[in-house]
Amino acid sequence: MDNSVDLIDWLGEDLSLALGGLVIGALFGFFAQRSRFCLRAAVVEVARAQAGAKLSVWLLAFSSALILTQTMILLGAFDTANVRQLSSPGSVSGSLIGGLLFGIGMVLARGCSSRLLVLAANGNLRALLSGLIFAVTAQASMSGVLSPWREALGRLWTIDGGSARDLLASTGIGNRGGLLFGLLWLAAGAWFAWRRRIRAWNWVGAIGAGLSVACAWWFTYRMSALVFQPAAVQSMSFTGPSADVLMLVLSPPGQPLNFDLGMVPGVFLGSFIAALLARELKLEGFEGGRSMRRYIVGAVLMGFGGMLAGGCAVGAGVSGAAVFAVTAWITLAAMWVGASLTDWLVDRSAANAPATLTAP
């Protein structure tokens, strides 16, 4: 511990948090790029009764985060007492409505917020523009013109913090039950992966992405105990942090650094390195005005929905689920519903529609 304290004293608390976020973010970005980790892709596979490679990647990442997080809690290496998703009051209405909107948006934008960041680093200009619109909308929802709407919807149905937000406590299964739950989903992911014979990088990348989420919990927990100034115990998320990075770029210099401000650029860097090594860097643009409108609408829905729900596909769907926050699981379920319905109503309906006949 003395060496850690000395290093923090030398670097400074803010820079130490940011560098930790940069490293963990880079690991996540690298593994997410190599594995093609994406909640939207997994949902679409299930909705079309084609569950296979993409679902297996998501399940391996999801279960790995749960297993390592719950193992750390059982070993005393991590404590959820000060985790915001559990200790503070939460909004059930925000989780439901926000999750639905986010699920709709990620199908329209063809990727959740983390996937857009990974793709943008590979040269996908559609993802870059969508990610910027997502960040602007998130900032507007957090403290701008959309914040009154977010606050009004969030107040419709709230629950207290503590055991009311802790699924493990309210169900009585405890952390051992949470660990067993994660192992069951790991077995399911491994079965789908074996059945589809996914390549080695899908296995390694998916598990690595999930472990990165758990490592973020551990790192911020350790830092909260070592630094003098209060530091949030948190894991990876992309809604609020994307808005924070946007404001860092637009605001005058001097804004204090934190974990989020290192994590988002880290994901971009890690994905870029992975694509560079795999020779997958490629500039891609929009296919037309209609396609562009679709991406913009999707990004706006994700930005508002993610801020209303208190998390994105990673922030709620993996980070929050790993500590078994009730609202995170509600958000995740709502994302699946919203994305499945949108795929059915928009993409599959368009694919099955007969071609329009025009006069010669």
Image: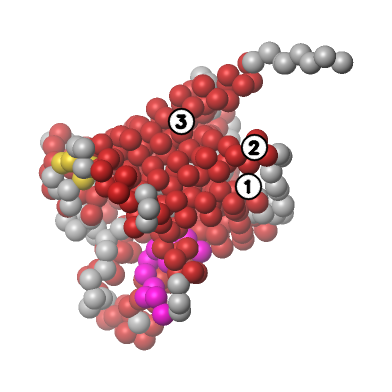
Query: Residue reaching furthest right?
Result: 360
User: Few, some or many C-alpha atoms within 10 Å of disc 3 (few <14, some 14-19, many ≥20)?
Assistant: many
Magenta stretch: give its range. 254-266
Secondary structure, mark 1, is: helix
Along the horizontal axis of the image, is 245 left or right of 96?
Answer: right
* Quadrant housing the C terminus: top right
- Can residue 209 be seen here? The reply is no
Q: Residue at x 62, y 61 (%)?
A: 273
Secondary structure, mark 2, is: helix
Q: Nearer the viewer, residue 9 or 350?
A: 350
Q: Position of residue 102 (x, y in %)?
A: 42, 39
Q: Residue at x 63, y 41 (%)?
A: 292
Q: Is residue 254 above or below residue 101?
A: below
Which of the marked residues, 2 or 1, is nearer the chain's N terminus?
1
Residue annotated with mark 1: 126
Q: CA distance from mark 2 to mark 1?
A: 9 Å
Q: Position of residue 179 (x, y in %)?
A: 27, 41
Q: Is residue 337 above or below residue 323?
A: above
Answer yes or no: do the residues labelled 2 and 1 have beta carbons within 8 Å? yes
Q: CA distance from mark 1 to mark 3?
A: 19 Å
Residue annotated with mark 2: 291
In the rendered structure, find residue 339 and report the number of the disc placed on it: 3
Q: Position of residue 233 (x, y in %)?
A: 27, 61
* Quadrant housing the N terminus: bottom left
In the rendered structure, find residue 203 and report the number of the disc placed on it: none
Q: Amino acid at mark 2?
A: Ser
